[in-house]
Image: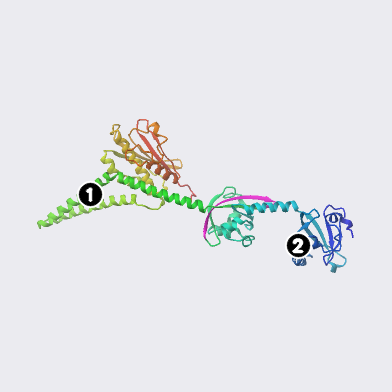
Amino acid sequence: MKLPETYTLPLPVFVADAGGCIESVNAAFEALLPRREGTPWFDAFIDIDRERFHREWGEFDRRAAPLTIKGKVANTGGGVRYFDVVCQALDDEQPDRQRLLGILLDVTEKTLREAENLAILETAVDAIIMIDEGGIVETFNRAATELFGYEPEEVIGKSVNMLMPEPHRSRHDQYMRRYMETGEKRIIGIGRELHAQHRSGRLIPIYLAVNEIHVHGRRRFTGVIRDMSEQQATREALAEQRERLAHVGRLSTMGEMTASIAHEINQPLTAISMYAQSSLKLIQRGDYDPAKLAAALEKLNTQSLRAGAIIERIQRFARAQESKRELLDLNLLLKELVKLAEGDARIHDVTITFDLADNLPMVYCDAIQIQQVALNLIRNAIDAMKDINLERGNAMSILSRAIGDHVEVAVSDQGPGVAPDQVKLLFKPFHTTKKDGMGMGLSICRTIIAEHGGELSFRNNPDGGATFYFTLPIPQAGDD
């Protein structure tokens, strides 16, 4: 039996009775699936689950909207075509018949394209997750399974925040609402490094890039996630190596300053010995003046504290320790450091002067590392002036100032300056102009300053000598 009203429609159409057998078809259906009248319409499709359809149709047949199911058809050419079967209950004079009107929409091209995209997703090296505008996961590829430890069916249909550690897990819905309301992009289209959470609870360092897509009027978000565990391990190993190298550099500096350190410690030790002997003689005489003895003991105590302070500064500077950055006053760091360097300066008849800016902004830095850099520049200045026998003068200056969004510390000397043939080699590892130098001082210092977000460089002074300087960024409002 033909279906007159729809016979000439280009879409395949059929009507099935309550038992599911085809009663009538149009020309397009007959061309696609000839001689199907009187047979169950399910048989025309390869993959439709009859029991599932009956269950869904039983819950759906009295509604106004149609029920759409997907089905595959094997045609005579040996290929497969994919259809959305739109099923609608027909109004009938005999309600108990409950006939079904079916319209076939060819979605072969779309299905194959989606299958190809899915295959690409499944073979991608990076984890790829797609969510809707409510944060619900729609796709979760194989690489995501390997990264997070979840199977797709455990994640799809649930909030993506299950893959996040706190506090981002609790705040994710708020992030989504803020973006939907304001359109302000804080990660979308930008990308950033952060941490995700494995099924086991372990934190995973990742690089996340998120893009927004619009398909069929829907907003969705695709996240491409790269596991940064190996890169982080490499960075940590390099950081540890740099820490060791910096420690070696500090020990080398202490070794080079042995003469000045010995001189600095010998002074209070000699005074301690002298006051101790004087006190003993007063006691041995028996008729000592208590006031004189007390004064001698007080001076002995002062000198012992002085010696202890010198040793403590040396130990603190030379000690191996993890990098620790704090908000610090650079002027105080420099004044403390000069107590370590002034002995070396006195031995070589060099005078250290200060030109430190008032109200200098504080900076985040590792105190020991920054002191290591400054001490290296001070000692280089002393050596440069010593090499020309102080013929241009014996004064060196330490300057601090704020320039824009950075703080600058500069050490100026009255030495020979930097020769043109040394400019390109100055910061190279193992390059040195000193007889006993390692050639690592300036290289280590430049690395330390670069890791702090600053720059280490130099300029020759117009009236002779050189100024070596480094900059450190001033923390801005909102910096984490």
Distance between mark 2 and mark 1 Cα atoms? 96 Å
Q: Identify residue type, mark 1.
A: Pro
Report the magenta stretch's main SS. strand
Q: Position of residue 356 (x, y in %)?
A: 36, 41
Name the foreground residue: 274 vs 263. Answer: 263
Residue 149's x, y, as percent? 57, 60
Q: Is residue 357 something that shows in the picture?
A: no
Mark 1 Cα within 10 Å, few/some/many (few <14, many 20+)? Answer: many
Q: Nearer the viewer, residue 163 or 387?
A: 387
Q: Left or right: where does residue 393 sit relative to residue 422?
A: left
Write the residue at 25% across / 53% down: 305
Ranked by sequence position, the earlier of labels 2 and 1 is: 2
Looking at the rendered image, the quarter that the N terminus falls into is bottom right
Residue 431 position within the rendered picture, expressed as x and y whole percent measured from the top left: 38, 38
Q: What secondary structure is marked by label 1?
A: helix
The reply to whether the C-beta atoms of the residues labelled 2 and 1 are less than 8 Å apart is no
Question: Which region of the structure is painted magenta?
Answer: 202-218
Coordinates of residue 461 in the picture (x, y in percent):
37, 32
Seen at 29% across and 43% down, the residue is: 342
- Horizontal arrangement in the rendering, residue 414 relative to residue 78 (left or right): left
Q: Mark 2 or 1, which is nearer the eye?
A: 2
**Mark 2, other Cα within 10 Å: few <14 / some 14–19 / many ≥20:** some
Q: Which residue is mark 2?
A: 48
Location of mark 1 (residue): 268
Query: Which quarter of the picture shows residue 71?
Result: bottom right
SS at circle 2: loop
